[in-house]
Amino acid sequence: MDTSAVHRYLDQHERDSLDTLFTLLRQPSISAQDTGVKECAELLAGLMRARGIETEVVPTPTQPVVFGRLDCGDPKAFTLICYGHYDVQPPEPLELWKSPPFAPTVRDGVIYGRGTGDNKGQLIAHVLAAQAWLQAAGRVPINLRFVFEGEEESGSRSLGWFIERHAERLRADLVYVSDGGLHASGRPVISLGNRGIQGITLVARGADRDNHSGNKGGVAPNPVWMLVHVLASMVDPDGHVRVAGFYDGVRPVGDVEKAMMAELDYDPVALGATMGLPRVDMDAETYYRRIMLEPYFNISGIASGYVGQGSKTIIPGTAECRIDIRLVADQDCEDVLAKVRRHVAGVDPRVEVLARGFGTMQPHRTSPTHPALPAVKRAIEAVRGVAPLVMPCTGGSLPNAVWPRLLGVSVLDVPYANADENNHAPNENITVERFLNGPHVSAQVFAELAAMAAG
Ligand SMILES: [Zn+2]
């Protein structure tokens, strides 16, 4: 399929692409603070309609989904859902921004602003690619659906609700997501999955107040000890989780995954530096297996008693602990939560287990033999001139599992931002080069999927 006219159109309209992005970036859309999200939905829908995409702002119990559709003229053609999110993280702390978060600014070839990388600068690539196809070829080569949600940064509360109610309109062959950054080496990446997350808060209560540890020591219950015993019973010193059935759903690591991990470069000193350690003390396979394909039971905070200046000899009244369990396919959040509840009740029923702290996202992994994978690889290589790294999974959590779980459709994540995009932090950015490259990749992906479907 000759795509040169489409790429030429994108090259000739770089100014328009940048203007479109800047319009979107100037509209705050902070889901955590409910600031400007609905306005941003309307703005995005308007930008899509102006580019020939039939677009609706669909209300949900929380933030609206911007849903667009563009048909190629053949209902039996390959149908791709492009998923992204138009909401952003809160911009605070404002004093650390070199230019205001919602006044996009270019410095040395880099666009700074909240949402540049995460995710406005990436989702709009799919829209610009569709526009280029319409303008240069008169139609898009596959059927396109656009699902842009307004609360990914707040746990995608209504994405599942939306998908369940609109399943008919969301019939598709593949979900395509561009979020996150390229590999630190600059190599493009295809990620086949994400770890999930289950947040848990443990609360241990003793007396209804702090007590004198001399006068009441040995009589009043100490909730910190309760918590310590419960925590120690759940995880071995080597990190192995002792909650019964915890590993039941974990998908075994196959030869394909091992081969993929062997492709990823590994520098124990450089990786150590990214986390403030002199070096990482393990071999490459262990490192990637632990981050990508094994669950992790994390304690992210413990609070109780007094550790301020001087001393205060108390038996604290309460102790609290936040846990985030990173899950892998095919573990299930609810199942793991139930097993943790059962375990804690067996060790110390006075410790309360609350499903609270970080929300919930299911883990997910697309098969490395998915038929669309070679087509997407070819598209990236054609545009970037270098083959992408295929990661069996990435360590962080995204809401992507809703697609296979609710619609039975697989997901491929192809990040378009630079690795140092500073997402969620001050001075979030995307380089002009990376931003302008995104629509070329999307446009080529549409072509390769069409060619694949045509056999
Ligand atoms: Zn984000």
Image (cartoon, helix red, strand yellow):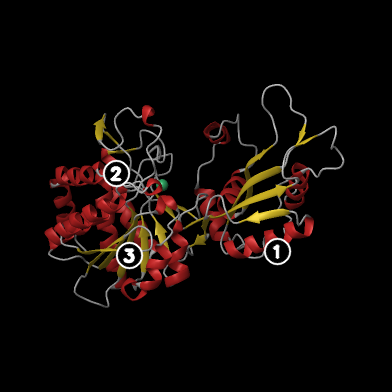
Residue found at x 42% / y 57%: 156
Would the CB of label 1 be found within 8 Å of ligand 1?
no
Q: Which residue is nearer to you in this view: 77 or 338? A: 338
Per the image, label 2 sits on a secondary structure element best described as: loop
Q: What is the three-letter code of the residue carrying label 1? A: Gly
**Mark 3 and mark 1: span between their CA atoms?**
35 Å
First along the sequence among labels 3 and 1? 3
Q: Position of residue 198 (x, y in %)?
A: 57, 55
**Mark 3 and mark 2: span between their CA atoms?**
25 Å
Q: Is residue 214 left or right of residue 84?
A: right
Q: Is residue 269 left or right of residue 69?
A: right
Per the image, label 1 sits on a secondary structure element best described as: loop
Q: Which residue is mark 3?
A: 81
Location of the N terminus by quadrant is bottom left
First along the sequence among labels 3 and 2? 2
Q: Which residue is mark 2?
A: 28
Q: Position of residue 17 (x, y in %)?
A: 19, 46
Q: Which residue is nearer to you in this view: 352 or 67? A: 352
Q: Which residue is mark 1?
A: 245
First along the sequence among labels 2 and 1? 2
Q: Position of residue 243 (x, y in %)?
A: 72, 58
